Image: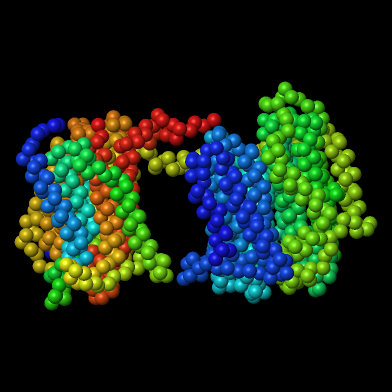
Amino acid sequence: MEIIMAFVCGFLFMAAIYLILSRSLLRIIIGTGLLSHGAHLLIITMGGFGGNNPPVLADGVTEYVDPLPQALILTAIVISFGVTAFFLVLAYRSYQELKTDDMTQMKGSEDHE
Amino acid sequence: MLQILCLFIPIIAAFFMPFFFKKIRNVHTGWFVLLVPLFLVIYYTTFIPVISKGETIIEQLNWIPSLGISFVSYIDGLSLLFSLLISGIGALVVLYSIFYLNRKKEQLHNFYIYLLIFMSAMLGVVQSDNMITLYLFWELTSISSFLLIGYWFNRDKSRFGALKSMMITVAGGMLMLGGFVLLSLMGGTFSIRALIEQAPQLATNDLFIIALILILLGAFTKSAQFPFYIWLPDAMEAPTPVSAYLHSATMVKAGIYLVARFTPVFALSEAWIWLVAGIGLLTLFWGSFFALKQTDLKGILAFSTVSQLGLIMSLLGVSAIAYHVDGAEDTVFKYAAFAAIFHLINHATFKGSLFMIAGIVDHETGTRDIRKLGGLMSLMPVSFTVALIGSFSMAGLPPFNGFLSKEMFLTAMLSVTEFDLFNFSTWAPLFPIVAWIASVFTFIYSFYFVFKTFTGKLNVDQLPTKPHEAPIGMLISPVILAGLVVTIFFIPNIVTDTFVKPAVVAIQPFLYTSPNDVNIHVSAWHGPTPELFMTIGIVIVGLLLFLTLSKWQKLYSILPERFTLNRLYDITINELLGSWMTRFSKLYMTGSIRKYLGYMFTAIPLIVIGTLIVKNAFSVTFEGSSPIHLYAVILIVVLVIGTLTTVFARSRITSIIALGSVGYTVSLFFVIFNAPDLALTQLVIETISVALFLMAFYHLPKFSKVEERTRFKFGRAFISIAVGVMVTLVALSSHSQKFIESISNYYKETVYTEAGGGNIVNVILVDYRGFDTLFEIAVLAIAGISIFAMIKLRLSRKEKNYESK
Amino acid sequence: MKVNNVILQFTAKIVFFIIFFFAVHIFFAGHYTPGGGFVGGLVTASAIVLLVIAFDLNTVHKLLPINYIYVVAIGLILALGTAAISMFVEQPFFTHFFDYFYLPLFGKTSLHTAALFDLGVYLVVVGVTMTIIQTIGDDE
């Protein structure tokens, strides 16, 4: 299972990077969304799927899934939501200001001070 | 506790300044600020009886005990003297600033916040016994000085001066930190007192000399010694109260303090004597010589400050000689340290008053250019009197305190000729000669300052505003200081017994154990000694040269600008860093974010895969894998289809919905992998995200129809494949080899007994790794507020609040 | 976009309360069973979003006149304050305390400072999510 998931993560990253390197702002945002999904799956895969029970104490159960990756991912999920929303607003505000969503035209100008 | 608290009282008071400034508009904010230094003066005065007996008081507050870092308030003669100077001059300067800064036009809260931060920082510097906190406060003085010099930040010159002082003093501070670290490595402690006790052992260490040089560099940059003095003249762009406070009375004396404080540690070293005395003497001469080149009143005072700091520094260097002479407490070598501290007090009084007068002249006439000024004596009689007292004291004339300490300075310099260790006999005659020449120039620039401004012809048409005497409030502080200048001359022994002798004990603990042992009596008349003849010579030659000044002042313009130290600084900052480095950076920093992303995503797989190969870390094993679920396979298929749809969708709505489907699939994965918390969170988040995308949909651009060039697409695909391969390799390797046991077992065992919870994931979040969560919600809040700001504030690039003048 | 959708609005009103109480439940259950501040906050936010979809932003703002920025601030202060409590009793930052009590109606209950911290998390999550939704929705 872990082996297959490793490839799935790789695939998700690949798709995400492909989108992030595109010219359109919206595609870049969608790319970051995919990237965070990939990262979450990667973390849980690296932790392994051993143990048959969720990490919630229950009577008579001794084998729990590793809880640490889950805690990390939970944090990451919420952060990635905040970041995605931030990007989204940044994108449409810059679209409103600059009238373009083409990354090749969005260059820092020399006299930006 | 009060003693430590007092270090922070100014900073705590700073928090309330915006409130006072915004809510109580009718009262000048300075009146509230004034309470702080006044309280501190009274508080530190209560220490005088104890300290002047030679006792010390210490209080400690642990900050990072595991590293041995703590806030220490160590009060002995030296630090009490400095604390009183900081709070006393601080009170006078704040009083002066109330009349100097207009409460309707100036951003007073900013000014006083910076000033109060500085006050705390400076008190911290002089009272810290722990070198790390000393460094902390040291840098804080640099930062507050930066803010104060740049207080009028819409002037180019202010910003330039602020940056210059920051660059030089912070660079020096960093070097000093290096010296501190070396010292602590050698001595095994951060405490200066503990280091002093083991000074002889330290001197045998190889690193000793490096630490010495590094710490001296810190002190020299801060105290504007040659060749680092160049920041001080440019710092004169600060409001005059700041110049009077930071750049003559207190901050620039931090370097002096440091040298005095570390004298017991380093005095055994020959290099210390040569460096401190030599650089000090050079600075003394250099500063006094170039002071005459200046035409700006504050410029003259800046160079004069440089020169006087050099004088004190050279005295401290000479004072170290006493460690190499047996029974020095009864020889002429005893005078140097005493003279250094005595002159430090005197300098603070006369230079403070002179700066305030320069500010008054600037305030009342609108210019500080000495070529335009003249004949103000009849219009500003009080200011003239104060200026006269200050200048004569600076020139070393009786009946003013400068005379006393200057005589003693000459005594100390003459004493060098009697020292015969370390090849001193060859060079020693230079010391009194240079000191004498510098004193002549000091005499000339003192006269230059006062007489060019206040006597001669009055050109009212050249002055921007019509001159008149300053308001009484502005005169109080300079008059008090000038009063001190005269008073100290008549009661020198009371002052020296109370303040100077305890400080000398702190500098020379090897010689004295209590202030009573310091066997020095100050007297204005001590017979026809060589010092007296030197002084008479200074007056005669100085007067001659001053009267012929207009004939030879032109000589200064012979030295071309190209070879000055300022030019060197400009070249370093502008040409080397500014131009050359920028051009290099421009080669790859093209401003295109896509390029940057390209660099990053190329570099990451290169580095990671490279490391995997070099370290031979890649391995795959099927052992320990969990069995493959049928559901999981279905989910994988769904996930792949969803991802592909996201990537290749032609319309944005398809793309967004496909992304949502990927998210839901991921949450189903979490269900399979026994992660109920994650599944729940992911499910809700995905719902809200999709709602968010759809809400923002209206504002977003359509996918552009422009076909991207095929060649770039290929490069893009290549980079993304590389990243994908890298991730897969890392995931496989990390699955296949586990080096250390997961900390999770500890969590599993203690979750109920120690943390009182059942859901391990949640307990990790709120308890074991609470810091993560705390910062995470902080990040989330920042994201939320920035979104709010981006939408609501609508800052457009056309709106610029502050234009450069 | 003023569509008068009676059935949706009526259902939304009822469902809102159901979701909201569910959110409160999983928030409190979080220490022992799946749930907690994050999920609770998100579920609460989604309940409000449901109302926004059924009615519109102005109506919802009248129903719940809350400045969500303040909610964020209160949450942050609560979380930081809880973490700082332990400093006043000479314990390292972030030490939590708990004990078991017998309360009427609830039976054996544990009172835990971690729950206060979690409440801070809950408030921040609700506040931020709603700030984002509201500002984007408000934007013309």
Q: Residue at x 9, y 55 (%)?
A: B635
Q: Quadrant of the N terminus of chain B?
A: bottom right
Q: Residue at x 21, y 36 (%)?
A: C58
Q: Position of residue B186 (x, y in %)?
A: 58, 71
Q: Nearer the viewer, residue C134 or C89?
A: C89
**Position of B57 compared to B665: left or right?**
right
Q: Nearer the viewer, residue B254 or B245?
A: B245
Q: Nearer the viewer, residue B498 or B800?
A: B498
**Residue pushed farthest front?**
C104
Q: Position of residue B658 (x, y in %)?
A: 13, 45
Q: Position of residue B717 (x, y in %)?
A: 22, 45
Residue B30 shows in the view: yes
Q: Residue at x 93, y 58 (%)?
A: B527
Q: In this picture, is B756 found above or below B413?
A: below
Q: Position of residue B301 (x, y in %)?
A: 72, 42
Asked where in the image residue B789 lies, by quadrant, the reply is top left
